[in-house]
Image (cartoon, rainbow, N blue to C red):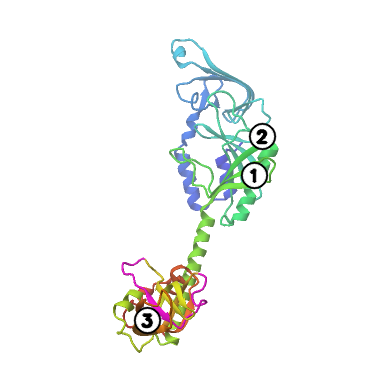
Amino acid sequence: MRSFTQALRAFHRPGPLASLLALAALACPPVRAADFITSPGSNCAVWGPWSLGDDKQPVRYQGPCVKGKAEGRGKAVWLNPYRLAEGKEVPDETWDGTFRQGVFIADQAFKGTLDAWRSNLVLSDRGTVGDARALWVHRAPSRGPVNLCEIEHVALVVPAGFKVEDDELVQARMQSAQQAFVSACPSNAPFRSTEVVLWRAPLTPDDKGQEPLALAKGAVVLDNGKPAQVRAYRNDASAAVRQQQADAERSAKRAQARQTFHRLSADHNVHAWLTAAQADKDPFKWQGKTVALTVRLDRMLSPTVAWVTDADRSGYSYAGLLLKGVNSDTFGKLDTAVVLGQLDGRRKASDLGVTGSSESLEATTLNVVHTRPCEQRLCADWLGWDVRKEMTWGEPFKAAP
């Protein structure tokens, strides 16, 4: 009977590189081979868990043997190594029952393939789930048989060409694997979680006995009669695709923001983009020329006059401006807008027709000729690109063609 390693290599049809790796593996027997202890009398090997399967724990096996491993109904006696050194065969543990490929399963009905994987793990071959090879990973107890209905997880080894980046497909395979496990090992427990892991490579451990990197993981959960759900899901391939899509969308938005920024600047002959602090510091520098600012509404002082500050208040300088020629709809849902106009020096609010408690306000004034509300925080729909590479705040600006 072929081992899992051989079966999975055939399943994957490896190329020249994989063949070289396979030859290297044959030249250097895997670490797990040490877990099979050969009975000197029958020359038949039995696999023992970590507490028994070392070279100091002798075993005596009686029963059928296939290709050097216990197979079928037999009996294995693990002897106390210290008493054996004294010439006495004193059993520490006796296994009487069924063996499959050297692994003790007692009276459990199982005719498939078993194989030790690492020092305390066993794989049982469960056929296929769709186009994936299904293996159950069992943790062997320190004493007694491997319980084939207790698993660490289901391993699905997918073939080349399987679309790992397709979350819907991957989760469907996970749920099918869970259904197969639940059908084979029914339980009345109200809550049941089955971890499923996808691999592409054959499950051959490295020289340290470690498993290959997983492609995707998830826990298929049955919770008090509710439909099965995949939780704690992780899929690096689909995450990478989503990241690529997000990066592409972000790049497209940045390109759109740049195009909109330059078109607006060109259409209205904007000579400079200013912060409120720059406009307040020297309101006369740009008189007679159209300038642009991104501002946040503080409050409307009249139906056409507003008191505003910079849309981005993260800077050290803070200044308020008076805008003339705006209305309540100018600033949109986020109370921010791009405003274009001509600076008109410092004016009092009363000069702009404001009455009441705010009429004494005095600040740099912008006579607004065009406005566009911002649809993103900090006006990122206008400035959310590498704007500083093509525009310097407070410096002469020429829009790109």
Please tell me whether mark 2 or mark 3 is closer to you in this view: 3
What amino acid is labelled 3 in the image?
Answer: Thr
Q: Where is residue 90 in the image (x, y as percent from the top left)?
A: 51, 12
In which quadrant will I find the N terminus? top right
Query: Disc 3 or 1, which lies upstream in sequence?
Result: 1
Q: Give the residue at mark 1.
A: 177
Residue 138 position by quadrant: top right
CA distance separating discs 2 and 1: 19 Å
What amino acid is labelled 1 in the image?
Answer: Ala
Q: Is residue 246 depicted above or below 301 in this figure?
A: above
Q: Give the residue at mark 2.
A: 189
User: Magenta segment range?
Assistant: 314-333
Q: Where is residue 104 in the image (x, y as percent from the top left)?
A: 60, 26
**Mark number displayed over residue 365:** 3
What amino acid is labelled 2 in the image?
Answer: Ala
Is residue 28 found left or right of 283 in the rendered image? Answer: right
Tell me the residue at 33%/78% (across/down): 279
Query: Disc 2 or 1, which lies upstream in sequence?
Result: 1
Q: Pick the residue in front: 342 or 153.
A: 342
Q: Pick the residue in front: 206 or 51.
A: 51
Q: What element carries label 1?
A: helix
Residue 295 position by quadrant: bottom left
Q: Is mark 2 on a helix, strand or loop?
A: loop
Q: Is residue 207 depicted above or below 252 in this figure?
A: above
Q: Where is residue 240 in the image (x, y as percent from the top left)?
A: 50, 58
Based on the picture, tell me whether residue 17 belongs to the magenta stretch.
no
Tell me the residue at 46%/16% (across/down): 81
Q: Position of residue 73 (x, y in %)?
A: 65, 23
Q: Is residue 203 depicted above or below 394 in this figure?
A: above
Confirm or deny contact between disc 3 and disc 1 (CB under 8 A).
Answer: no
Q: Residues within 10 Å of mark 1 (few under 14, many from 20)?
A: many
Q: Kindly report the secondary structure that dominates the magenta region of the rendered protein.
A: loop
